[in-house]
Amino acid sequence: MIGIIGAMAVEVDGLIEAMEEKTPETISRMTFWRGTLGGTPCVVAQCGAGKVNSAVCAQTMILRFGAEIVINTGVAGGVGSRDVQIGDLVVASAVVQHDYDTSPIDGDKGRDLPLLGVSAIETDDRVSSLLAACAEEVCGGVRRGVIATGDQFISGRDRLHEIAARTGAIACEMEGGSIGQACALAGVPFAVLRAISDNADDNAVDDFPKFAAESARKSIALLLKALPRL
């Protein structure tokens, strides 16, 4: 069973429409669609924006539906790098939470996540490598690197540069890091696939609605190609 999580309807509706033998179940005000995609047993859900929603969704997929792999899909903001542009696909090598910080009381360990003792959580290499290979086939290219997560829509150049410099991230969003934390705590492999919808800078508020739908479609097309190979 593979769990697929997106924050917005545009990020998961195409997958739900493509599902066969699907049945819905509502838990914690989230609707989980169980069925098959390309013959692969899956459960797909829209979690809503933010770290709490996405962590609850991932935990539910693991405990209620027996998800053995969890994939977070959708869109993200780039960090202004020339190597990552609007429309590009990004597969995370690791995830960090840029807004988690207890360093005033914990010193150098202040960015390490509770119970895990690390600040960066590595994604599953097998699943991530397969997604990257499919991205090469679907779109002719992919970027791999750290994705930063926080409970903020980043739309300012100064804040963007600070996050990129501190974390080494090539994209930022609001769910991947918390999904990764929930999966790491449960010992479940996970991956994060994002298509860049904006550059998280001063133009992000205008660029996001303009490019989000098309960027999400790229992620959906890639997943539909990759799932039968998992």
Image: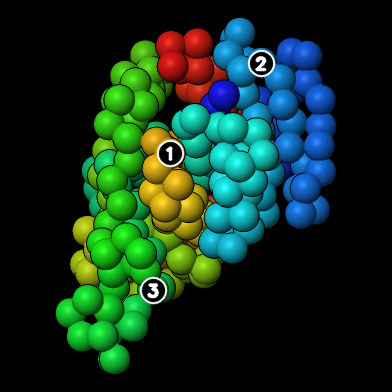
Q: Of helix, strand and loop, which one carries label 3? A: loop
Instruction: Tell which of 186 and 57 is nearer to you.
Output: 186
| Amino acid under disc 1 | Val
Crowd class of label 3 (few under 14; some 14 to 19; many from 20; radius 10 Å): some
The answer to whether 49 is drawn above or below residue 122 in the figure is: below
Rendered view: 118 above or below 36: below
Q: Residue at coordinates 72% horizontally, 26% vertically from top-left?
A: 34
Badge 1 element:
loop
Residue at position x 18%, y 79% from top? 108
Q: Which residue is mark 3?
A: 100
Instruction: Look at the image and tell me whether residue 202 can be seen.
Output: no
Residue under pointer 1: 188
Q: Quadrant of the C terminus?
A: top left
Residue 202 appears in which quarter of the rendering?
bottom left
Q: Are marks 1 and 3 in contact (CB under 8 Å)?
A: no
Residue drawn at x 67%, y 39% is 64
Q: Nearer the viewer, mark 1 or mark 2?
A: 1
- Label 2 to label 3: alpha-carbon separation: 36 Å
Q: Secondary structure at mark 2?
A: strand
Give the x, y percent position of residue 159: 36, 74
**Farthest left residue in view:** 108
Q: Which residue does the numbered mark 2 point to in the structure image?
A: 36
Drawn side of residue 60 relative to residue 133, left or right: right
The disc at residue 65 is none
C-beta proximity under 8 Å, tags 1 and 2: no
